[in-house]
Image (spheres, helix red, strand yellow):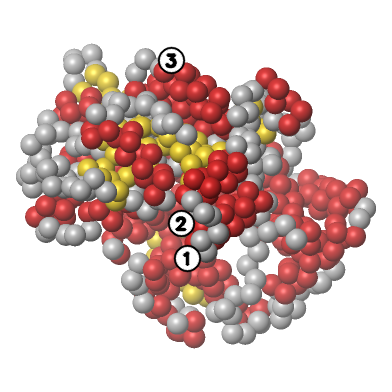
Amino acid sequence: MKARLTGLFLCMLMFCMSIFAGCSLVTRDMAKYLSTKVATITLKEGKGGDNDSMTITKKDLITAYNTYGNYYQQYGYSAKQAMEQTIELLIRRRITIAQAEELYPELSEKEKTYLWVETSDALKDNYNSYLNEVLGITDSSSTDEDGIKFTGYTKNARPDEDQNGKSIILKINTQQTELDQFTYEVARDFDKKEDKDFIYTNFVDTIREGNNKNSSEAFDEYYKALLKNEEGQKLSEDRPSVFAREIERLYNVIYENFMIEKYQEYYTSPEDNVSYISSKQVVDRYTSKVRASYTKYMIENTSTYDSDMKSGANNIYYYKSENDDTKFFKVAHILFKFTDEQTEIYNEIEEASKNGEYATPAEKQRALDSLYSQVVPLVREKNEETGIYEEVADEDKKSFETSAQALRDYIARKVAEGRTAYEKADIFNELIYKYNEDPGMINPTDIYAIGVDGEGKAVSNFVQEFNDGGIKLYNNGQGQIGDISDLVYSENGIHVMFYAGEVKNLFKGITESFELEEDAIDALSGYRPNILLDKTLFDTIYDELISDNYAIFENLQMNEIKQLYTIKVYTNSYKDLI
């Protein structure tokens, strides 16, 4: 497990901007204590460069450890090992930034302005977190009241051939960075005093414009947290000075993260757009995953296959297919959800049934039918400018189907317009964002899997009515992708289910020595594990290889670069933290 962390180093180099406060590792709040040297990084004589000496302090270590130390320990590291890995992370970060500054000694006007705006926004974001606490808002993320958005997937590459017919992978440069999209009217430079000071002035003016008790209280709480963070360091405590240091801290984090990103981009963006990942590497990685799954579920004969499939089929690459094995298939659905009041009525009906208050099953069914007839599907419309699906007000629903049965029939007609399985899935996926109230169907990594054992019973974590609806769509293996269920009634409301196909192996003849030729790349690039998302097996494995291969390259590059420096770690300086 420990080796796997290597591929995460670059991500971990990117530090966060939240306030460091309430640290469990801080035992003394003294300026001298926190400024104690933990490591020094000194450029060897004659190696050139401006960053000839860098220091990592105890405060740097404590801040980083409280962010990442627990993460390391989750991977089996002891406290001592986690501390050592955190120091290594800090050393890499400092060296990476130094190398980036050698490559890019001067930032453009746009970049300087972008960093200034990001710093200003970060200050406001931190303030807003305190304002949310004052207002009692525990989750400021987007909810159904604000609307929902399909995030989709942006492809990074595609298989192709060069002029000699050799298989290659072309990078797709479709993603614009935040900097690419950034526009500005007034140039700013954080290194200019008037621009730096204006961040605080503008910030305070914005709070004063609010002119209410909540704004002032949030400002006070932010200020108190900053004071607490600097307690014992004998620093000036007037608000402008305290926030000037906070603004400096935010800018440094943003600037350093920005330079690390530039460094990564420099080494991962080939000029000819041909990826350094080969088709053979993609195919080989896929076959290794298939062999691993085959070994686990066939040779080792583990009994966890069914439970693993119920938990999520997207991480399994070999599917058992013997006659007596559980057959799994996938479904998506749209839920017309009960209101809280309707849920209470449903529970009352079930309780009354248990207590024998219904003379016959038909009497209970009439009560349920009456309840389900009152379910009114939610309706959203897509805002083409923002891409957000926003709920339609009741008075504007006249042009929409508002009964469950009519809407189910409309969904079935729309899906039938698709000419291929993927077209049908794409149509249903769009309808999910218009009508569905199950959060599990909003941007899922995978959709739901249901199994059928040899006796025809469901192997699933879902309610029985949902399982029954899925098994009916499966139809003993005769179901077709895009088949739509009748209305399915459950304790959650009313479901319209979409059959997404049986879970099958992509290739035949799989054994523990399974191998494929390079041309198998075409099959991988044509198969979506999650049918609702245009992300193929090729995309999944390519993205994984990019991450891993860059980590290997980054390690090799870092080991070479570290030879330019004399690095000293003072273990006695942090013994009290272990």
Residue topped by disc 2: 12
Q: Nearer the viewer, mark 3 or mark 2?
A: 3
Q: Using residue 511 as the reference point, say whether residue 52 is left or right of it.
A: right
> Which residue extends farthest right?
211
Q: Is residue 63 visible?
A: yes
Is mark 2 in CB contact (under 8 Å) with mark 1?
A: yes
- The percent coordinates of residue 514 (x first, y second) are 9, 41
Q: Which of the 4 image quadrants contains residue 400?
A: top right
From this view, report whether residue 446 is shown above or below residue 567.
Answer: above
Is mark 3 in CB contact (under 8 Å) with mark 1?
A: no
Between 465 and 18, the one lying in front of the other is 465
> Which residue extends farthest front?
359
Which quadrant of the rendered structure holds the N terminus?
bottom left
- The percent coordinates of residue 445 (x first, y second) are 41, 43
Q: Is residue 174 visible?
A: no
Residue topped by disc 1: 68
Q: Using residue 328 as the reference point, say whether residue 287 is left or right of it.
A: left
Q: Secondary structure at mark 2?
A: helix
Residue topped by disc 3: 417
Q: From mark 2 to mark 1, how far is it between C-alphas?
A: 8 Å
Task: Kindly identify the amino acid type of the residue bearing the numbered disc 1.
Answer: Tyr
Task: Kindly identify the amino acid type of the residue bearing the numbered disc 3.
Answer: Glu
